[in-house]
Image (spheres, rainbow, N blue to C red):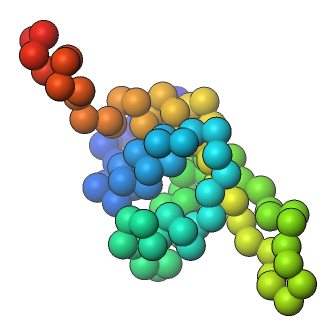
Amino acid sequence: MTRARRPSAQTTAVLLELAAEPAAWRYGYDLGKQLGLKAGSLYPILTRLAGRGFLDTTWDTDVPTGRPPRHLYRLTPFGRLLAAELAPPRLEQRRAT
């Protein structure tokens, strides 16, 4: 997959937050709270990333009575590669160069 430009700061923050636990399914609401992003910014980012193949999505199947089902998100292998490209260099890597 090729990208025309570098993702926005908010998109990068979402990818890096998901990369902290790449195999874990995460709720959009929780991501928004952790990153300080409002729904109007976060959900278009998640939709765009999923549409481009960087996120897997599913519905929560273990829903308590009275609560509507929620979407869950996690990185695909392509999403993990993108997050690794966007991650800031680690201290040992900066010293070696």
Q: Is residue 89 above or below residue 50?
A: above
Q: Is residue 12 above or below residue 31?
A: above
Residue 38 locus on image (x, y percent): 43, 78
Give the quarter of the figure containing the C terminus: top left
The residue positioned 62% from the left and 64% from the top of the image is: 27
Say left or right for 72 vs 75: right
In this picture, residue 69 sits left or right of residue 95: right
Taking the image as shown, residue 21 lies to the left or right of residue 25, namely left
User: Relative to residue 54, is residue 90 drawn left or right?
Assistant: left
Q: Position of residue 61 (x, y in %)?
A: 87, 63
47, above or below 7, in the image? below
Looking at the image, the residue that sits furthest to the bottom is: 66
Q: Specify the farthest residue to the top.
A: 96
Q: Position of residue 85 (x, y in %)?
A: 36, 30
Q: Is residue 38 visible?
A: yes
Picture layout, residue 45 above or below residue 33 = above
> 38 or 26, which lies in front?
26
Using the rendered image of the protein, determine whether residue 15 is visible from the camera's viewpoint: no
Q: Residue at x 54, y 51 (%)?
A: 49
- Along the line of sight, which residue is nearer the eye, 26 or 79? 26
What residue is rendered at 10% in x and 16% in y? 95
